[in-house]
Image (spheres, coloured by chain):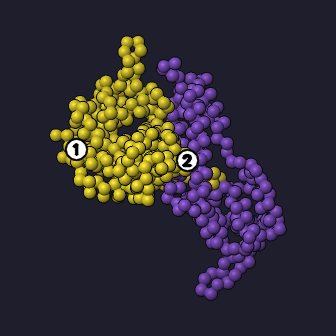
Amino acid sequence: MDTVESLPIVSPILRASGLRMRYGQGSGIVHALDGVDLDVATGETVAVMGASGSGKSTLLHLLGGLERPSAGEVWLAGRRIDGLGETALARLRRTAIGFVFQAFHLMDELTAAENVELPALLAGQSPRAARRRAAELLERVGLSHRAEHLPSALSGGERQRVAIARALSNEPLVVLADEPTGNLDSAATLDVLRLLDSLRTAGQTLVIVTHDARVAATADRLISMRDGGFVEETRLTHGSTGRLGELAGLEG
Amino acid sequence: MSQAVGVSSKEPSDGYQLRVVREVLLALLAKEASHGYQLRARLQLALGPLAEALNAGQVYVTLTRLEKAGLVTAERVGQTDRPDRKVYELTAAGRERVMEWLDDTSWPKPAPAEFHLKLVAAAAAGLGDPGRLVDTQRHAVLAGLAAAQRAALAEPADSTAGLLLEGVVLRLQADLHWLEACARYWTPRKDR
């Protein structure tokens, strides 16, 4: 069946191998993704950076089952998902993957709380359980006091925090975020940064596509893309503040 | 900036040596006479997590030198059950040095020139792919930004050291913007 609850937790939780994506045909063919391999460990935050057209958003769409690859495989929790039927894939997206988009994609007619409840209700939870979960999540993103507001009454940063709470609704195996601060000013960006950092600390598996260096810097691992492929990869985790003195210009 | 006044590299090498440490100590003494450990504590407050790697003995070694140079005077104060400690006070010459430092507008290390020349030379001599050099450099700068940002996020909202860390983050962001421009210039595009 399509439920992911029955799947064993494996590491890597998310795996892509030989991933290719072509659009168009003949001489107009565009290789948006040109043979990408990626393993994301459980609890890991991976940031993918690249100029527009580098293939980073295509990669995220393939990882989340929003599009199907031209070639290659996508595995989630030990199960191959790129060949699943449309219904199974839709169900998987609802229950096992949390999406965060640049443009928030909240339902305008629903309050913040109702937006956050929605995925739990769609996954078959009772209204009471969904409400409780939504209240928890809104508290976690610091927006309990805005629960009854419509999105139009919220700032951009608040809307994105609601969207992040919504993405966490079904305790997804992985959260996929596409330019989560792309529409935000620097103060709102800082709020979202703190939130992403707290998700990482809490062990949420997270893949973030971004061109914002500060967002990328919250990750455990950074990957740069160009022309549909990976060109550079760096582990950003470190316990030492040793280099900071030099960066601050304190050392002489 | 008065780099020449900085401390030589011959001192104890545990931890990093603070640049312009003489000027900083003199400036901290401008308000009132202090013990060495009080000066150290004020430095630690201003630097937060950045003070962890600071050389422990540098403050005391430097105070002794400042005394010899006539920029501070030291008075021994007896303590009942401990060795005497020294209280340092700024002299007129020391105060003058502080004012010179405050008026100095030089700004440390503008970074781009060396890297720019490295790219130009690498491209001209066919030593390496400048685009790859830029990619590697961006990741190195981002690793620094990640360290500074994590330290900044860990500071309380009104922290003095947090302000310094924010400065480090913003400067590295500016470096990254420039490196993006370098990438656009030096990276051949497949589709153009």
As displayed, is residue B1 above or below residue B63? above
Residue A52, position as x, y percentages in the image? 48, 30
Pick whichever of labels 2 and 1 is earlier in the sequence: 1
Q: Which residue is mark 1?
A: A4
Q: Indicate the chain on which mark 2 is placed.
A: A
Q: Secondary structure at mark 2?
A: helix
Label 2, label 1: how far apart the Cα atoms are: 37 Å
Which amino acid, mark 1? Val
Q: Nearer the viewer, residue B152 or B63?
A: B152
Q: Name the quarter where the N terminus of chain A is drawn.
A: top left
Q: Quadrant of residue A144?
A: bottom left
Chain drawn purple in the picture = B
As displayed, is residue A161 above or below residue B32? above
* Numbered mark located on residue A186 in the image: 2
Chain drawn yellow in the picture = A
User: Which residue is at 48% across, 20% downward?
Assistant: B190
Crowding near pointer 2: few (<14 within 10 Å), some, many (20+)?
A: few
User: Which residue is at 62% across, 87% downward?
Assistant: B80
Q: Secondary structure at mark 1?
A: loop
